[in-house]
Amino acid sequence: MDEVFKALADASRRRLLDSLNARNGQSLRELCAGLDMARQSVSKHLAVLASANLVTTVWRGREKLHYLNAVPINAIADRWIHQYDRERASALADLKTALEQTPMGNTEFVYTTYISTTPERLWQALTDPAFTSRYWGAELQSDWKVGSPVLWKEGAGEFKDLDQVVLESEPPRRLSYSWHNYQPEHAEHFGWTDAELAELIKEKRSKVTFDIQPHGESVRLTVIHDDFEPGSKMYQALSGQLGGGWPELLAGLKTLLETGETLPAGPDAARWAEISAR
């Protein structure tokens, strides 16, 4: 946590985080132009932010894109805010809120976390139904070969084909598959009319990618969920704007692998997992 506090102490680095919060996935050139800062200065500040895990990077062809990673801010808030009165913690709380509020136009979600495990064990946790049921609330079944379906089962029900397909599979380093579309149960949960659901179903399908990289005695897991329509309800749900989503799910995955225990799912996360798996 010392690295996070050090990174946040500099006003220029906070400006970089604000810029990424306003528009995630910027190149070094875009960040320099938007903030009127020298390239060398921006590079140095980004290195500090990346070291503190406040910024994560993804290569798109030959271009390196930078994404804000709110995980350390959430960890600080969870550990410290409850120990102080509201006034003394307001600045940190405001920053946490700002980092969690993503512009409606975003079409991709990027999240990085570090887990004390091995790449092989993490791959198993992402692909073994016995694992996914413990932190996801649903069993995911596939042979995890490119082109194969990914089936879902919740509780004692049957496995269902929600038209999800494996797109990339390089065990134990990279896994990608298409995401399911909206289900009638989503409309029931969120109060959408039949007309609203019919319009939402027209959205193009998104996809999720898990990038697994060794990092010392730990593993760096980056989740990239992209190809959303601007303003997508699915994006809002999975990014955690409606409660739960990938941040809560990945916290459960990390806890399970590091302690063997499972986190109690929040009502929103549990409900979303349940209706997605029906």
Image (cartoon, rainbow, N blue to C red):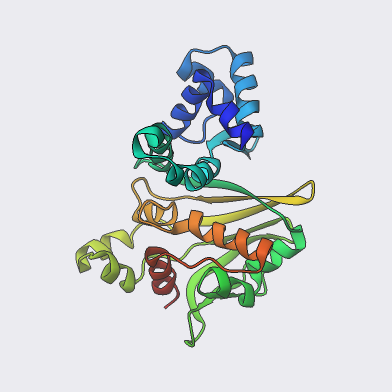
Residue 151: image location, x then y, percent: 54, 76
Q: Position of residue 24 (x, y in %)?
A: 47, 35
x, y percent for residue 92: 43, 35
Q: Is residue 49 left or right of residue 265?
A: right
The quarter of the picture where the N terminus appears is top right
Q: Nearer the viewer, residue 215 or 153?
A: 215
In the image, farthest residue toward the right: 216
Q: Residue at x 70, y 63 (%)?
A: 123
Seen in the image, is 128 located left or right of residue 172?
A: left
Q: Toward which corner of the image does residue 6 lie, by quadrant?
A: top right
Where is residue 86 shown, x and y percent of the image?
A: 35, 39
Can you say whether 32 is above or below 219 in the image? above
* One can see residue 224 in this view: yes
The quarter holding residue 48 reads top right
- Residue at image coords 76%, 58%: 118
Q: Nearer the viewer, residue 160 or 87?
A: 87
Q: Which of the image's four quarters has the C terminus? A: bottom left
Identified at 42% across, 43% down, the residue is 100
Q: Residue at x 64, y 20 (%)?
A: 44
Using the image as rendered, state which of residue 95 and residue 45 is in the foreground: 95
